[in-house]
Amino acid sequence: MSENQFYTPAQVVDHSIQGQVTKANLPLGKMLLLGILAGAFIAIGGTASSVAAHNITNVGVARTVAGAIFPVGLMLVILVGGELFTGNCLLIMAALDKKITTLAVIRNLVLVYLSNFVGAFIIDLLVFYSGQFNYSNGGLGAYTIKVAIGKATISPVAGITSGILCNILVCLAILMAAAAKDVNGKIWAIFFPILAFVVCGFEHCVANMFYIPAGMLAATNSTYVAKAEELYGITAAQCQALLSPSSCICFSYVTLGNILGGMLFVGAICYAIHKTNWKKA
């Protein structure tokens, strides 16, 4: 351990690989419970940021406010514990180092992805039945519908590229948090990259596990549907389309982008830089 207040990038990669071996070998029940927790934590960040931003008409200001709150989700994952699909894309480093198998990576990602959805959907249900969407005379419910429609109708190219950009920032936030030796350092390391991804409007598949089902639930309420038409010009037909299974296709685009962003653009590159034996010419 160095005398600095943080670990060096090479140390971060080494420590991360050790942690990834542990993640890949978690007992099934523990892995699923940690995945549920992580999905719930990200959803809590999502719902809090929606409440804060839903009445702000300036897009830049609204995203900045949301971005200042949303990072609490990843803070909870890092400091309390959780298995998050997007962050676990970094397992590629341990696989490249031959510490775990490709099959172990796939197993972890599939199980964590599914359990993240369960955790996020639990928060969806709790928020919906809590009456929170009634805020601003149903304005929050309308806003939730608008956000869900925007995410569900994203094009494949936009979903993939936005997913790549998002998980570059998420995985960098995780590595930066791993570089910090104290809680304050970890909090600030998480805060700024996640703020940046929210402000930029990039797509995060686990966050969408909250936003899209939340919008679907809101679209079952006629008051929120009417408010969505009043505030945003969203028609009842659009709300009905949101409830169709085709609305979930967008998850595949964003998930693929998140995988590429985390594995290729961060994990593989960091491994190549810090674990490859570079010889001088």
Image (spheres, rainbow, N blue to C red):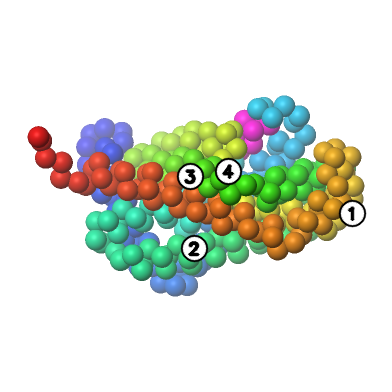
Which residue is identified by label 4?
Answer: 158
Instruction: Using the numbered discs, state the Cα–Cα distance from disc 2 to disc 3 in whole angstroms.
Output: 19 Å
Q: Look at the numbered disc 3 and give the secondary structure of its residue.
A: helix
Which residue is identified by label 2?
Answer: 112
Left or right, 40 with reference to 213: left
Image quadrant containing the C terminus: top left
- Dot 4 crowding, Cα within 10 Å, few <14, some 14–19, many 20+: some
Instruction: Using the numbered discs, state the Cα–Cα distance from disc 3 to disc 1 in whole angstroms.
Output: 36 Å
Residue 86, how many percent across, how many down?
A: 48, 52
**Which numbered disc covers residue 222?**
1
Q: Earlier in the sequence, mark 4 or mark 3?
A: 4
Q: What stretch is highlighted in magenta?
A: 62-69
Q: Earlier in the sequence, mark 3 or mark 1?
A: 3
Indicate which label's residue lies in the foreground, 4 or 3.
4
- Dot 3 crowding, Cα within 10 Å, few <14, some 14–19, many 20+: many
Indicate which label's residue lies in the foreground, 3 or 1.
3
**Which numbered disc covers residue 164?**
3
Residue 277, how many percent across, how many down?
A: 15, 45
Instruction: Using the numbered discs, state the Cα–Cα distance from disc 2 to disc 4 in whole angstroms.
Output: 24 Å
Q: Look at the numbered disc 1 and give the secondary structure of its residue.
A: helix
**Type of the residue with mark 3:** Ile
**Type of the residue with mark 4:** Ala
